[in-house]
Structures are given as structure tokens and as C-alpha cells.
Image (cartoon, grey):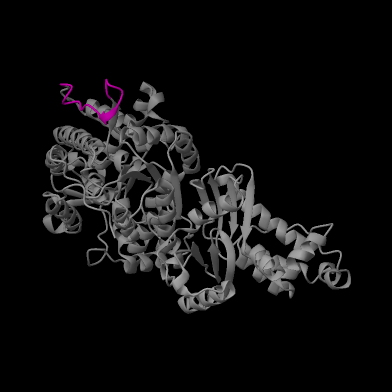
Amino acid sequence: MITVGIDMGSKTIKVVVLRDGEVIGRGIELAGFESREAAEKAFDAALQDAGISKADIDGMVATGAGRKNAPHTDRDITEVGGDAKGVVTLYPHARTVIDVGAEEGRAIRCNEEGKVLDFALNEKCAAGAGAFTEAMSRALEVSVEELGQMSLRSKNPTPMNAQCAVFAESEVCLCSTTRSRRKIFREPYTTPLPAGLFLWLARSGSSLTWCSSAESPTTRVSSILWRELWSAR
Amino acid sequence: MATKQKYETQPLKCWGRAKEIRENFYRDYAQAHEKGGLRWAGGAWTFGAIPCGLGDDVWSITSEPYAASIAANKEFSMRCLEATERAGYARDLCSYMRNYWGSVILNEYLWGGPFPKPDFIWQDHICCSHAKWYQVVCDLEPGIPQFCIDVAVGPYNEITENKVDYIVGQMHDGIAWLEKVTGRAYDDEKLIQAVHNECRSTALWAEVCTLNKAIPAPLEEKTMYSLYVLGTLMKHSKIVADFYEELRDEVRERVANQIAAVPNEQCRLMSDTQPPWGFLSLFRYLEKFGAVSIGSLYTFGLIGVWEVKPDGTWGPRTTPQEQGVDIKTRDQALRILTDWNLSKPEWQHFYSPHLKTDMMVRIAKEWSLDGVMLHYNRGCEGLTVGIAENRLGLIEAGFPVMTFEGNMGDEREFDLHKTMTRVDAFMETLGVKK
């Protein structure tokens, strides 16, 4: 049985083709202004990757912020519901999911069947979301992929004081004029600022998790992680 | 596509009358001077029965319902809010207050013409915002005499004679003040009648809400807002008391004949705090899922007065008239008015979120709810205080809860699309499909 899932995210459109539950094809496109066109491209890319045609598909489900705009789908599911079902399918012991999206962070508590028991979403704040990380990578003039790797090498993270994403960006710009910036480029093994950023991101996600009465084990899904996995294959 | 119709539905027969009462209220206030009468302004929680002793030609405007009406008019609300901010008032203040002040600053009445200046202000301190509200109005429109009763005496389960004396004493002073500022002699018989009307109307509203325990629910919350608001305008009036009796009888008939508010009812919810008034379409969106909001502690308990019945359930409080109490004196009327108002559910949770949680869990159980939607309302610190604790208490009691941030009176702080997305996720959680 061949099924297709489309995640119509606010930033990227991701398509996955499965045969009897195994991934056989993927496609990804930036959503842009014309998300439906982008979805068609991602869909075509995924079919090509899988080596199948549209007629071979038995069912198709959409999720994501733009799911109502997804082409070819039979039905849609919210991101919260999709996160829970998807994660429990991949990691049967997971009971809490943290999804760091481009604009929205979600913490979800679920049962062994992937049924959502409780969830919490960030409110009007980009803190803890992917868009913030991309803004920080631009501020530091490094790619998002590099930012993650650099942060893991740090032994001495720079603490971030701001709670708000906008003020955090100001703080980064200020820090970058001090020794930290010169350290980034002269001493690649000491990268306190990126480490501080990701610690800040993690704390934002953790506070959401607390709101949803999280249970172990916890699985974290993020667009950044997805892109790293994509580029690593 | 909505789920299949399960129940018969029909509009309320008394709906037109409700609209008429509300329109007359705002018209009468504006035209009070033309009729040779007086007009006063104060909060919806104020002891509105008391100025009735000044005569039958005394009309009022209550601040929060007026501000909520402004909030529902997005264009006028934005002008009011921006006028208030230009005048230097902070954006994180009570949004009702900012809408009201804006109307005064712009000198525009929502129903047309200049803002009708009151002859006096009759207020009470139910929250920090109410304490300052009309002080600022007096700054904006100097020369309006104001009397404010301090009501911070604690929750009803700790009421003592001393606390009642404290409030009643202020009421006696207030009546003397009213006579002085208006030059009118006070009529205690009119006060007594107003107190009886208030007890009757607020008990009847509670009875209407109790009838929503029925499955299917005869009323849904969006409609209930337009009905309960009459009690926030003039709960002390015979007009509202008579209307609520007519409404009660019609709702009883709907229950007896299984007439539903939402014909495909398959999920029962309650909300809490004031809704985002400019976006009541959210409730219509719920109906696509067959989800009915049967009310809330806010809808039930801001006007309704309740008691625990002999069978342990919540129901309308027995009125003094039903108990055979014959009010003979001013002091007796004021004591009954004080005790009656202090027992109101919404008054309690200013003091402890746990008191509110207990009431909310009771509603969730007795009204057979499947879930709760909590509005983390940035516009009202009084009704939102402790709401995160309420959420935990409801979850602990076994009820799924969805939260959404917003503002009852400032549309800039509410995202309808995102909230609807949350509703989608919540309905999935409850296993409810469109």
C-alpha cells in the first residue's frame, strides 16, 4: 500500500512517500507565497524519488499550517495530531513530543496509540521557534547547519538574558561586537554564542513541555533537525 | 461539512424583545435629559438598585457592557483604543476601560451623537481597574460627582456581620450623598422594589443557565451573551426580571421538546472569561463540529446568583420573596442587597483561584461537559487572575482543556485563524469530527 503525507509548513513543504510504512521517497520545497505551487513541486519531487506515479497512490493526508491548501489530499490532520501519531509510529515508547516549527513550538503528551492527551502551543512569540534560529544565523553570518554544529563544540555558552526573540536578536548583535565574534572565527572550537542561543531555544521548548504535563520519554522534532537529516542522507 | 442533524432547532421567540430592551436602555440613557430625568454611570457590578430610589426617571449606563459593545464594532473600537493611547494611557490596561475612555475622549457615543455626560457616577471597587476607571473619567470630564463603595470584604464563605455592616454603612452614606447631589428626596419603597427585582432577575437567569444541563442544550453561549447582558444593564428593573421569566418559560419548553441550540450537538464544552467580543464567530466555528458551549462561570455567575440545592447540585438561589421575606426598611433592603451580591459566583474568584476551580469543576460535572476552552484574556486582570491554576484543576478533575490567548476588547491581541487551528487540534483530541 502506497501512502503520501504532506506537511504544509509555514516555511517549508515536506512530502514523504511510504510503501507499507517504509519511506521510499521524499520531496521538500520552500513554501513561499504560492504554497500550493510549492506543494506540487515537492509532491512531484517525492514521486520521482520514489519512482512511482500519482496513480499508484492509495491515500494521501496533509498536515501543517497550510493543510487546507494542500493538493491531491483525501483528508487532513492537525500538526498536533500528526506529531503524536507520527512520533509514536517511529518511536513507540515516546509519550511526549516537542515540535519546533518555523513559527510555532508545540509540546504534546500522548498515549501509546498516538492519541493526544494534552498539548501546549507557544502564544504570540517567536521564542523557541525555527524562524528565530534562522534570524540568529543571519545575525551571526553563519548558516543554520553550521550554527548547530558550532554550538555543540562550545565549552562555555554565553548566557542569553532576553526572553523575547526580538530583544535576543539585539543581544546577539551586541555580543557579536565583543570577543565572542572574534572567537567564533579565530577559534572554531570555542563557540560560546551559538551554544547560548541553543540553550535559550531549549529552555523555551522545556517551558512548553511543562505546560502540557510532559511524560518521558520525550522526542524532539524540529525543522532544523529535519534539514540536517535531509542533508546527511 | 457539519455532522448530520440530530435534533430539532429553532430561534428563540423572545429574541426580538431582548434586542429591544438593550436598544431602549442605551437610547433612554442618552435621552434622559430631554425627558427631564437624570442619568448616571457606573460599573455593571455596582449596586444599581440604590439610585432607583431617586425616581422612575433615572437611567444609567454600565461601563463594561458599553465597552463590550464598542469592542464588537472593530472600526470604532480601534479609534477609541488609539485615542486612549494617544492620551498617554498604557496599552496593557483593562481593554473595556480603554474602549470606554476612548469614547469619552473622542466625545462619540456608539449609538450616535456626542457621549452623554452622566449627572453622577455610582461605582464600586470590584477590581483595580474599576477603582481607577471613573477617577479617570472625572479627569477627562471634570465636575461629575462620584461615589464609590469599597467592596473588598473577602469571599462569601467567610462573610461576617461586620463585613456586611461595612458595605451597608457605605450604602447609607451613599444614599445621603445621592440626595445631596441630585436635590431629590429618596424613596425607600422604590429601593425595596428594585432589590426584589434584582433578586428575581438574577435568580431567574441562574435558572435559565441551569436548564442548559439538558441534553441537547437549549441555548448556546453566543446567544446567551446577548441574553445575560440585560442583567448587566439593569438587573434591578422589572423589565429585565419580567423578560427573564419569559425567557425561562421558553427555555423550559425547549427542554421539554428537545429543541437544541446546535442541531448536531455531539460535544459539550464551556468557555471562560469574557470572549474576544469582536470574534464571536469562533462559537459558530465550534458548531461545525457539533460542539456547543453551554456557558461558562462568567456567563452563569456574573449575573446569576446561585446556591447549592438540597440534592447537592447547583441551582438558582432562593429569593427573599420566595422565602416569604417582607422587606420593610431601607436598612433591611440594603442588607439583603449586600448579601445577595456578595454571594455571586464571579465575586469569589477575586480572592482565590481555588474557589473558582471548584465552581468550574462543578459546572463541568453537572452540565456533562467533554472539555473546556479557556480564554487567557489579556484584557481583564480580574477575571483572568489564577486562570492557569484553574486549567490545572480542571485537568486534574479529568476534563481536557484548551487555552488560547486573546483580549476581550482589543482585536490587536487576538489571532482568530490561530485560535481556530487550536480548536481543530482540540477537537481531534476529543475525537470529534466535523
Where is residue B253 shown, x and y percent of the image? 12, 39
- As displayed, is residue A135 above or below residue B282? below
Residue A184 % position (x, y): 83, 69
Prevailing SS of the magenta stretch:
loop
Residue B268 x/y as whole percent: 32, 43
Q: Is residue B378 visible?
A: no
User: Does residue A26 show up magenta in the picture?
Assistant: no
Q: In the picture shown, does residue B194 fall above or below A143? A: above
B329 sits left or right of B426 in the view: left
Q: Quadrant of residue B193?
A: top left
Is residue B311 found inside the magenta-colored segment of the image? yes
Q: Residue at x 53, y 59 (%)?
A: A20
Judged left or right of residue A26, residue A40 is left
Of residue B180 and residue A227, the one placed in the foreground of this image is A227
- In the picture, measured across the screen, residue A127 lies left or right of residue B193, that is right
Q: Quadrant of residue B254?
A: top left
User: Which residue: 79% across, 65% down?
Assistant: A150
**In the rendered view of the protein, which quadrant contains the C terminus of chain B?**
bottom left
Q: Which residues are magenta?
A: B309-324
Q: Which quarter of the rendering shows the N terminus of chain B?
A: bottom left
> In front here: A206 or B297?
A206
